[in-house]
Image (cartoon, rainbow, N blue to C red):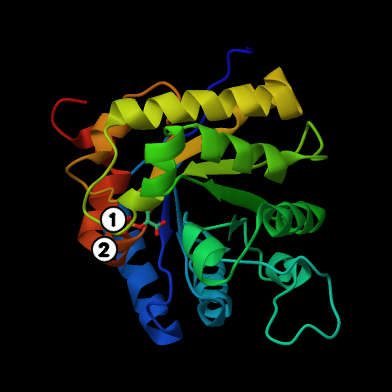
Amino acid sequence: MAAVTRTPFIAGNWKMNLDHLQAIAFVQKLAWSLQDAKHDFDAVEVAVFPPFTDLRSVQTLVSADKLPLGYGAQDVSAQDSGAFTGEISGAFLSQLECGYVIIGHSERRTLHNETDDVVHAKTAAALKHGVTPVICVGETAEDLEKHGSSAVPVAQLRAALEGVASDADVVVAYEPVWAIGSGQAATPDQAEQVAAALRTVITESLGEDAAGRTRILYGGSVKSGNIAGFMREPNVDGALVGGASLDVTEFSNIARYQKHVGV
Ligand code: PEP
C-alpha cells in the first residue's frame, strides 16, 4: 500500500438538534474555542454536520468569518431533482459548499429502511455533485453475536463502493450500532480490527492508492476521555461523534486529542 499520510478527521453529527440560530452561536463558539487553544486545523480537520435548515446559516458564517471549519449534511437524495417531496439534492448541497454528507447512518438504515442499494445510490449521487460521502457502516448487537464484528460492515461497504471510481474521495465511518448513544464504546482494538478489514475492502474495490488515502473514522460513544485510544490505532483516522459533538468544550477537546495525556 502506498505510504501516505491521512489527515485525522473529527466530525460532529448533530442529528436533529440545534436550529439555525443555535447553529450560528455554536459554530462561532467552537471556532473561538479551537482558535483560542491554537488548534492546528491542517493537522486535525474538524467538521460539523448540522440539520439541513442550518446549512445556509453555517455556510454564511464560515465564509464571512473565514472559519477553518468544515461542514456537511446528514443525508442526500439519490435523485437530482423532480417530484421527490422532502428530498434534498446533492446539487443543493454543492451550492451550499458542503464538503461532506453523511450517508447510511444507522438511524437512517433502521428508522427509514435505507438498504445497501439506497446507500449505494446516495453515495453515487454525492460523488456526482462533488460532495464527499461519509459512508456509515456497522453491525447491530445481534449481528455481532451471529456473525462477529466485521462481516456486516464489510458487506455494507462493498455494496456502497460498487462502481465507484478509483480516484473518488470518500470517508468511511465504522459505527457499531450497539455503541451509538449507548455510552458503551468499542475498544480501540475492536475498532482497529474492523477498520483494517474495511481498508481491505477499499483496496479490493478502489485499489491501493484509494485504500492508502481514504480516512476511516470510528463512531459510537466517543468522548474526550476515550478518543486518544482510538487515534493511536493505525487504521483509525478520526471519529464521527454524536452526543458529545453538541457540547462545545467536549467536542473541541475531542478535536484536540493530541494534547491529551498519554498520546
Ligand atoms: C452517531 O450517531 O453517529 C454517534 C456516533 O453517536 P454517539 O457519539 O452519541 O454514540
SS label for mark 1: helix
In-front residue for pair 259/140: 140
- Name the residue located 71 percent from the left edge and 23 percent from the top edge: 204
Write down the residue under mark 2: 248
Quadrant for the C terminus, please: top left
Write down the residue under mark 1: 251
SS label for mark 2: helix
Quadrant for the N terminus, please: top right
In the image as oriented, which residue stretches furthest toward the front? Answer: 146
- Label 2 within 8 A of ligand 1 by Cβ: no
- Name the residue located 84 percent from the left edge and 77 percent from the top edge: 81
In-front residue for pair 95/39: 95
Indicate the amino acid at tag 1: Phe
Residue 116 in view in this figure: yes
Task: Please state if 123 lies on the left or on the right of 134 as rendered.
Answer: right
The reply to whether discs 2 and 1 touch (Cβ–Cβ < 8 Å) is: yes
- Name the residue located 52 percent from the left edge and 58 percent from the top edge: 105
Badge 2: residue crowd in 10 Å (few <14, some 14–19, many ≥20):
some
- CA gap, disc 2 and disc 1: 5 Å
Badge 1: residue crowd in 10 Å (few <14, some 14–19, many ≥20):
many
